[in-house]
Image (tube, rainbow, N blue to C red):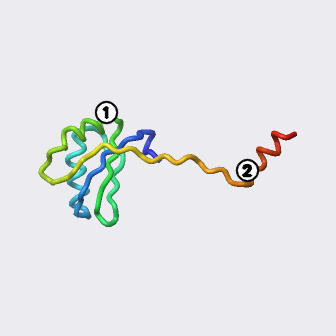
Amino acid sequence: MAYNNVPHFCKIQPLTGGEDDRASIRREFSQFGEIKKIYIDPEGRYGKVYLENNTCNKAAVNALRNNSYGWRVTLAEENRRKPEISDTSSKYVILNLLY
């Protein structure tokens, strides 16, 4: 689910993992707005940075395309899944329509 109703985030690849990445991400991305959340993959393959709005995300991606860390920074969007309806609830709806 998107963080704080902001559907886009900045995706960073590759990372080395650990607190050095987190500190570097915080330092670089805070220039573009308030950081709402930083996620670093446990294996250190990639990170996600959620800024306060999509305008800030786009500005960060444009400015950090060429950076000294060797990061590939892209604008990404959360995969939104439709809620699944269980068999029981769908049968209930069908039965109600028949009456």
Q: Specify the amino acid type for callout 1.
A: Thr
At a point 30% along the width and 49% down the height, the residue shown is: 11
The alpha-carbon separation of the residues under discs 1 and 2 comes to 40 Å
Q: Secondary structure at mark 1?
A: helix
Percent coordinates x, y for residue 65 in the rendering: 19, 44
At a point 42% along the width and 46% down the height, the residue shown is: 78
| Furthest residue in direction right, as rendered | 99
| Furthest residue in direction left, as rendered | 68
At a point 45% along the width and 39% down the height, the residue shown is: 5
Q: Is residue 19 above or below residue 12?
A: below
Q: Is residue 86 above or below residue 6?
A: below
**Viewed as shown, does residue 48 lie left or right of 6?**
left
Point out the frontmost of discs 1 and 2: 2
Q: Secondary structure at mark 2?
A: helix
Mark 1, Cα crowd under 10 Å, few <14 / some 14-19 / many 20+, is: few
Q: How many marks?
A: 2
Q: For residue 78, which numbered disc appears in the image?
A: none
Percent coordinates x, y for residue 85 in the rendering: 66, 50
Q: Return the residue at label 1.
A: 55
- For this rendering, which residue is in front, 34 or 62? 62
Mark 2, Cα crowd under 10 Å, few <14 / some 14-19 / many 20+, is: few
At a point 24% along the width and 43% down the height, the residue shown is: 30
Res 20 quadrant in image: bottom left
Sequence-wise, the earlier of marks 1 and 2 is 1
Percent coordinates x, y for residue 21 in the rendering: 23, 58
- For this rendering, which residue is in front, 97 or 5? 97
Q: Specify the amino acid type for callout 2.
A: Ser
Q: For residue 89, which numbered disc appears in the image?
A: 2
Percent coordinates x, y for residue 38 in the rendering: 33, 52
